[in-house]
Amino acid sequence: MINFFKTLNPFSKSKKEEEKLLRPTFCYSEYQINDWKKSVIESAHDILRYSANNYWPMKFHACGIFGKKCTFYDVCNTTPDNRAYKIESFFKEKGNFSLMGNEDETS
């Protein structure tokens, strides 16, 4: 069972106080949980491979999946010879990230 809190707009005047904080529960079968675990592991393997190859493939199906364009939309939609310039111009590196939590503070 998945159990979590969900808040609606806390500043909304149209909702009663008890309606602003919801606690829905979801029940998943054992096979669904096992499939989810496999999916997460595969995604982690993809991320490790992308990082090792310094190649992050475009996911065109997700360009506007959350109601706004992806952070990297302009990078993906420029010519290959212009991508490095856009990355250097629009993004700042924050050091080396490690999945093990050992961030390199010297970068």
Image: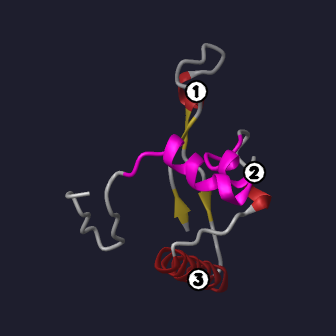
Query: Residue beneath label 2, please?
Result: 77
* Res. 42 mark: 3
- The quarter holding residue 43 reads bottom right
- The quarter holding residue 38 reads bottom right
Percent of width and height locating residue 22: 57, 41
Residue at image position (54%, 64%) is 2
Magenta span: 69-93
Residue at image position (75%, 47%) is 64
Tags 1 and 3 in contact by the CB under 8 Å rule? no
Per the model, the C-alpha gap separating discs 1 and 3 is 35 Å
Per the model, the C-alpha gap separating discs 2 and 3 is 27 Å
Tags 2 and 3 in contact by the CB under 8 Å rule? no
Q: Say which amino acid is labelled 1.
A: Asn
Percent of width and height locating residue 24: 60, 51
Relative placement, left or right, of 49 versus 93 is right
Q: Main secondary structure of the magenta part?
A: helix
Q: Is residue 99 above or below residue 64?
A: below
Percent of width and height locating residue 68: 71, 39
Residue ranking furthest to the right: 61
Q: By what rule are the colours in the image chosen?
A: secondary structure
Badge 1 element: loop
Q: Which one is earlier in the sequence, the residue at label 2 or at label 1?
A: 1
Q: Is residue 70 magenta?
A: yes
Residue ranking furthest to the front: 81
Instruction: Please state which of the two labelled residues, at mark 2 or mark 3, is closer to the viewer.
Output: 2
* Res. 43 mark: none
Query: Residue beneath label 1, please?
Result: 9
Q: Say which amino acid is labelled 3.
A: Glu
Residue at image position (26%, 63%) is 103
